Image: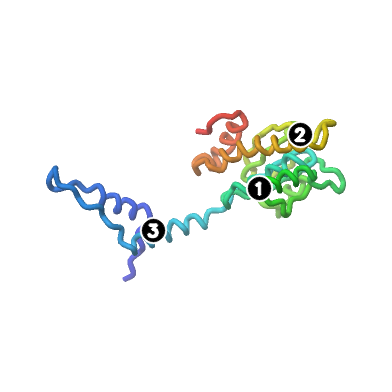
């Protein structure tokens, strides 16, 4: 009869017991236990399988026109997420033929972040029945935070991370470029904390509190 493979937890416990088993004599030292290759390979395969079976966390960033802040956040999370996160962005009222702000695309490209596939779109696209289900929806401008959102399939957690609009004002092109760089820097600081959080802080019951704590620059528990 074929025996079931031991679980990763039992394998780890067994390996630890080999290392921590007390010596027969107080002054005797046990040699370091070698990990059998078949056990090591099996454990690695099990861990890899658990990792590859994990679905990415879907995050939607919203602002009014989906041309600057939400575009920066989408591209940056996809860059930092290492497959654990899938970011999207949309706007509450993008203008007709709205496109991402050229300075947003320039800032991302200069930072070595891919701009492939970035586009401005209405948030209604993500309220459709066949839209990807979001785990977390984050507004990144105060106007969008104050508007009535569509019904999101899957009832995702929500949070607000407010950033000043880098495209606002009558500054020179160089001043606006600096504003975009600063905005990207601020978003990066928050997202680097977010993507390095343990899985326990990103579960369905805790992700909303986690994201809202980050908005207040708190260290998520």
Q: What x and y, as percent, mark residue 13?
A: 31, 51
User: Which residue reaches farthest front?
Assistant: 174
Q: Mark 1 against mark 2, which lies toward the viewer?
A: 2
Marks 1,2: beta carbons within 8 A? no
Mark 2–mark 3 Cα distance, whole angstroms, equals: 49 Å
Q: Is residue 109 above or below residue 3?
A: above
Find out whether the residues at labels 3 and 1 contact each other: C-beta distance under 8 Å.
no
- Where in the figure is residue 18, as x and y percent of width and height? 25, 52
- Residue shown at the point (54%, 38%) measured from the top left: 206
Q: Earlier in the sequence, mark 1 or mark 2?
A: 1
Q: Residue at the spot x=78%, y=33% of the render?
A: 175
Which residue position is annotated with label 1?
A: 87
For the residue pair 121 and 124, the one nearer the viewer reads as 121
Image quarter in which the N terminus is found: bottom left
The residue to which callout 3 is attached is 43
Q: Residues within 10 Å of mark 2 (few under 14, many from 20)?
A: some
In the displayed structure image, the side of residue 101 where residue 109 appears, left or right: left
Q: In terms of secondary structure, where does tag 1 sit?
A: strand
Query: Dot 3: what SS?
Result: helix
N-terminal label among 2 and 3: 3
Chain-order first, disc 3 or disc 1: 3
Residue denoted by label 2: 165
Q: Hey, which quadrant is residue 62 in on the image?
A: top right
Residue, far left: 25
Comparing 2 with 96, the one in front is: 96
The relative height of residue 31 versus residue 63 in the rendered view (above or below) is below
Q: Residue at x 52, y 39 (%)?
A: 201
Cα distance, mark 1 to mark 2? 20 Å
Crowding at mark 3 (Cα within 10 Å: few <14, some 14-19, many 20+)? some
């Amino acid at each position: 009869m074929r025996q079931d493979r031991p679980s990763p937890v039992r394998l780890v416990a067994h390996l630890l017991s080999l290392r921590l088993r007390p010596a027969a004599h107080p002054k005797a030292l046990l040699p370091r236990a070698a990990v059998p290759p078949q056990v090591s390979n099996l454990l690695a395969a099990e861990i890899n399988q658990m990792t590859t079976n994990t679905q990415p966390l879907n995050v939607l960033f919203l602002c009014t026109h989906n041309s600057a802040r939400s575009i920066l956040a989408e591209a940056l999370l996809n860059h930092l997420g290492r497959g654990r996160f899938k970011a999207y962005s949309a706007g509450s009222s993008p203008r007709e033929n709205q496109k991402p702000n050229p300075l947003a695309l320039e800032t991302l490209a200069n930072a070595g972040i891919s701009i492939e596939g970035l586009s401005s779109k209405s948030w209604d696209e993500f309220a459709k029945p066949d839209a990807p289900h979001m785990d977390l929806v984050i507004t990144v401008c105060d106007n969008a935070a104050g508007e009535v959102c569509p019904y999101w399939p899957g009832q995702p957690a929500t949070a607000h991370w407010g950033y000043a609009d880098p495209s606002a004002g009558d500054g020179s092109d160089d001043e606006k470029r600096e504003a975009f760089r600063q905005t990207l820097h601020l978003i990066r600081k928050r997202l680097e904390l977010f993507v390095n959080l343990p899985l326990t802080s990103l579960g369905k019951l805790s992700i909303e509190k986690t994201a809202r704590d980050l908005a207040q620059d708190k260290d998520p528990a």
